[in-house]
Image: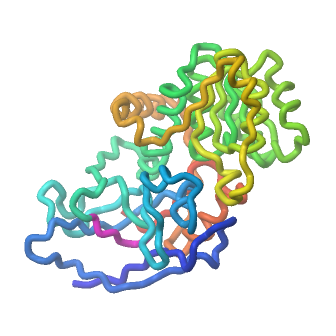
Amino acid sequence: MEVTNRYVVITEHVDGPPEERHFKIKSETLSLELESGSKDIIVKNLYVSIDPYQINRMKSYTSSQSAMNVAGPLNSGEAIAANGVAKVVVSGNPEFQKDDLVSGSVTWGEYSVIKPGGSIRKLDLLGFPLSYHVGPLASSGLTAYGGFFKVCKPKRGEKVFVSAASGSVGHLVGQYAKLLDCYVVGCAGTDEKVALLKKLGFDDAFNYKQETDMKATLKRYFPEGIDVYFDNVGAEMLEAALSNMNVFGRVAVCGVISEYTDRNRRAVPDMIDVVYKRITIQGFIYLDFTDIYADFFSTTCDHLRSGKIKPLEDISDGVESIPAAFVGLFHGRNTGKKMVKIAED
C-alpha cells in the first residue's frame, strides 16, 4: 500500500525574516510496507509544533557553532524536524504497534518515517486533549518549567519580568511564577495580548510597541527592581532588564527572537551592572531538563486539572498552513502555543 505524503521544505536558506516564498509543499509517494528486518516506524502526524528557534537551522550561517551541535543545518528540499504527536501506521519496532499514539520528533508533513534511535515515546493522553501534548505537557512546558524553576531559582514573592509573555513559553512562566506568589509583569505586542495576560493572573502587563524608553518603562513597573528576568527577546529588551535588575538578580535566556532574523542586532549589556550587581545570566534549552521531566509532567498535569495553569493555544489547520504559521511567529501573529493540526486522530 502507498500513500502520498505532503511535507514542507525550504526552497532556499533564510538569512533574514522568513517569507512564505522560502517554503513549498513537496509531495512524494510513501510505501507503507517496510522492508524485511527494517526497524523503521511510519507515523501519521496529527499535530506539529511551530517554533521560532527552527529558523536557526534554515540559515546559511550561524553565529554560534554550538547551535549547530544541537541541530545541524537544514538543506533545501530536506524534511523539517519538529516536535509533535502522531499515530503509528506501521512499525518494525516491537515496542510500537499500529495505532499507538506517540509524541516526540516528527516532521512538518502528513507522515513521518522514524528511524531507529528516533526520539519518540508512547503517549498516554491522561484525559487531556492531544494538543496539550504539543504545548504545556511537551517541550514548551518543560522549557518554561525548567527555565523558571531550575535556571531562575525563584524565591516566593520575588519580582519577575517576562518578555514575549503571550508566547508559547512566556504565558506558562508567568503562571508558574504566580503560583509562588511572585509579582509578575509581562510584555506583549498588542493591547489584546496585554489584556489576556492580565486575565491569566499577571499582576501587570504592557504593550512594548507603545513604549519609547524601555529602561524607563521597566523602572516604572518595577520601582524596587527586578529579581528574575525570563528573556525570550534579547537585544534592547535584555539591555533594559539588566539595567533594572536587583543585586543577585537572575536572567534566564530562553530565546532571542528579535535577533534571529537580524545578525547585526545584538544586546549590548552594561557589564559593570552585571559585575557589581552580581547578576547571573544563563542560557538553556529544554534538553537540559531531562532530570526533572517526571516532576515537571506530574506537577503540570495537576495544575492543568485544577485550572491553576491555563494554556493558550493557536492552532492552524492542514500542512499547507505551516509556512504562514511559521512566518507569523516573527510578526507577533500568534497567541500562545502555535501548532498546526494535520489530521484527525
Q: Is residue 104 above or below residue 142?
A: below
- Between 154 and 261, the one lying in front of the other is 261
- Between 46 and 94, the one lying in front of the other is 94
- Between 20 and 267, the one lying in front of the other is 267
Q: Which residues are magenta?
A: 109-114
Asked whether 298 falls inside the magenta stretch, the response is no
Quadrant in which the C terminus is drawn: bottom left
Q: Residue at x 50, y 25 (%)?
A: 149
* Picture coordinates of residue 85, whole percent (x, y): 38, 57
Location of residue 183 by image quarter: top right
The colour scheme used to paint the residues is: rainbow
Q: Residue at x 68, y 44 (%)?
A: 233
Quadrant in which the N terminus is drawn: bottom left
* Picture coordinates of residue 307, whole percent (x, y): 52, 31
- Between 253 and 195, the one lying in front of the other is 253
Q: Is residue 200 above or below residue 203?
A: below
* Picture coordinates of residue 247, whole percent (x, y): 69, 15
Location of residue 262 by image quarter: bottom right
Q: Residue at x 11, y 58 (%)?
A: 94
* Picture coordinates of residue 239, whole percent (x, y): 76, 36
